[in-house]
Amino acid sequence: MKNVFQVRGIARSPATAACAALALVAFLPLSSAKAQDSSGSAGALLEEIVTTARKKSEAEAVQDVPAAITGFGATQIEALFVQKLSDLSYIMPNVQMEEIGTFPGVQNFSIRGQGINSSIPSVDPTVGVFVDGVYLGSTFGVVLDTFDIERIEVLRGPQGLLFGRNVTGGAVVIRNARPTGEFGFRARAGFNDGDQYNLAAAIEGSLVDDTLAAKLVVLYDDDSGYFENPNLGRDFGEFETTLIRPTFVWTPNDTSELTFIWENGSTEGDGAAWTNVTAQRAGAQEDFLTTLDEPGFTDIEWNQLTIEANFDVWGGTLTNIVGYRDVESDSLVDIDGTSTPIFAASGPTEQDQLSFETRWAGRINDNWETTVGLYFFDQEINYREGRVIQGGALLRALGGDMDGSNYGLFWNNDFYLNEEWVISAGLRYTDEEKTAQIISAPGGIGCGDIVTFNCTFDNLEGDWDNITPKLGVQWNFADGRQLYGFFSQGYRSGGFNFRNARPDVIPPGPTREEQNNTFEVGLKTTFNDGRMRLNIAAFHNEIEDTQRELNVGDPSPAGVVVLQATFNAGDVTIQGVEADFVALLTDTFSVNVTAGWQDSDYDRIDPVVEQIETGLGLPFPLIGGDLPRLAPSNYSLGFSWDIPAGNLGAFNLAGNYSFRERNAYDDSNLNFFEDQERINLSANWFSPDERWQVSVYGKNLGDEANWGNLTSIAGLFTAGPMQKGRLVGLELNWRYE
């Protein structure tokens, strides 16, 4: 049997693999098992989904790692019809991978209730995104396309030991597919009833036999606009995206390898699809309709260069990764989303970064495995925001410039006491400096030059250093079964606020750094000859000096419509449980269940909260009872069914139902995301030679409405950027290998 894939720990032919993942959600594949394919032939060795997240000399099976990790292989990504990272938002326990929508392409990812809640580019994310080992320092341009990605790993909980600061919520680790040296070609064409079509292709082969392999990936996506807009006389939400990614892998000998990856991409189109949420929820305006009068625009371009070198030295692997990335983003949006010119804003942003990591990983002896490394990161962010209020009656200029550098030294160890017990211990030292120049608003009046931004700037700086420890234990009490527990600490450095509209009440920064102490215990099991799996994890997070983002309507008649700021709100406890179960009930039918529960409480409210409430004259508490983007419960149910068809090939049917409970948008708990349900279905045909695949799929078949954020417009009504509803599409894939 050729081309056997592993989908969520189940051995399958491509027919099964291509859509089984649509139903399966915790994705911690088995490290070793056998099963039968749909034709009844002898079970094939499962192709494992592996992870390099622990930065060891060799990749590990995800199921063997003593931590909560959700892993997607290339097959699962394709089967889910994932085009952007945000498409994965509803299919992992206690994970929300939302696009904020203020400006298109900006992420507000949240894991276990820890995430940011704004599009302020000077605010560091709590969920870090890493592409080919390179940390993306800005939230702009991070909702990435996923074509030809080898795998995506979502690590839940603080990752401060190996990934550094600003990953107190977790990390999303992405690895692009490398060329193997063998000739191969694949192409994808698709369209959906939202007037969107896309074309993508990847070709790879050998330029020098056994020495230099190359791959070229190209993508084009044209979205004609999903949302209705009677004012403009056309559909709204037009976007055109192009991407090119050449990759070269040079292997001069058996002990060294050099990888070169360059990616250039661009997105152009309308501004975000803001609308009057209050009217839609009251039934006074249809869902997925906007009456905004200013279409605005979006123009994003990014370049990323990654050079990775690996050498077999000193009995281990020496890895060096150099990464450079620059993003230029410009956008104009009609934030009130109505036909009245109340509030529009532009946000030109430039970000460039350079990072370098060198590490050695290997075994000191049979019982001691270690990873030690150095890390350097430097970035510059420039942001200008022009607010046009009441049709131009009031103009306000916000923004700033920030330079930051980060140095780290990390060391992680695994001590194998015997075949069952492993002790893990590690430390990281980090030093970070930031300097910022932020547009001032003296006397609360502010600067009105939104063309040249010839304004008064405040000069600010911050410096932080600390040691991040981690200590854990793993008990492999049976084959394919383990119990684990660990304590870990993470830090999120202090920051600045580029939207410094009321410095007379809230300083622009720096905020104090945030510290997260995490305790996690978990169970990972496989049983019934590898045909069933149950994983459970429980966590307890204690966050000191948690950083929050104010987002309220400006109560001042001469204000800026929306007030945003960053501050240390106090100390918070977050705790919860996650579980997933998957079973291959027959050789051709699988089911899964996943669930997450979490809650939070403020243990201490910082005195600055009362000062802000008094200074702004807010008629409501600044801090409510619920943390933003923390859904108390979420779960998913799914299935996948293979239907062999002899000389006609094979068919597969798959489906998934997901639920996310009502959760707060803002810290004041004035606006909430309501309960969300997602129903996804797909039907697929695979040719007998396994080269052709034709798929019909449906996303969000319940046509649920949702918004990237819920912003109060001067306290009068709530506006938000719309997310797409029901989509039905057709996709055609062809490959030659």
Image (spheres, grey):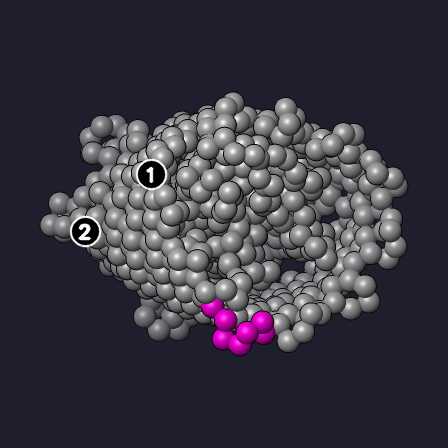
Structural crowding at the residue carrying mark 1, measured as other residues with C-alpha within 10 Å and reported as few (<14), some (14–19) or many (≥20): few
Magenta highlight range: 205-211
Q: Is residue 22 left or right of residue 257?
A: left
Residue shown at 36%/60% (left/top)?
Answer: 201
Residue 411 badge: none
* Image quadrant assignment for residue 661: top left
In this view of the protein, can residue 585 be seen by the observer? yes
Q: Is residue 641 left or right of residue 518?
A: left
Q: Is residue 452 left or right of residue 256?
A: left
Q: Position of residue 461 (x, y in %)?
A: 62, 65
In this view of the protein, can residue 324 be seen by the observer? no
Q: Amino acid at mark 2?
A: Asp
Q: Amino acid at mark 1?
A: Asn
Image height check: is 163 above or below 30?
A: below
Residue shown at 58%/71% (left/top)?
Answer: 210
Image height check: is 443 above or below 543?
A: below
Using the image as rendered, state which of residue 256 and residue 2 is in the foreground.
2
Q: Label 1 vs label 2: CA separation?
A: 56 Å
Quadrant of the image containing the C terminus: bottom left
Disc 2: which residue: 293
Using the image as rendered, state which of residue 189 and residue 437 is in the foreground.
189
Q: Secondary structure at mark 2?
A: loop
Marks 1 and 2, the one that precedes in the sequence: 2
Residue 262 falls within the magenta-colored stretch: no
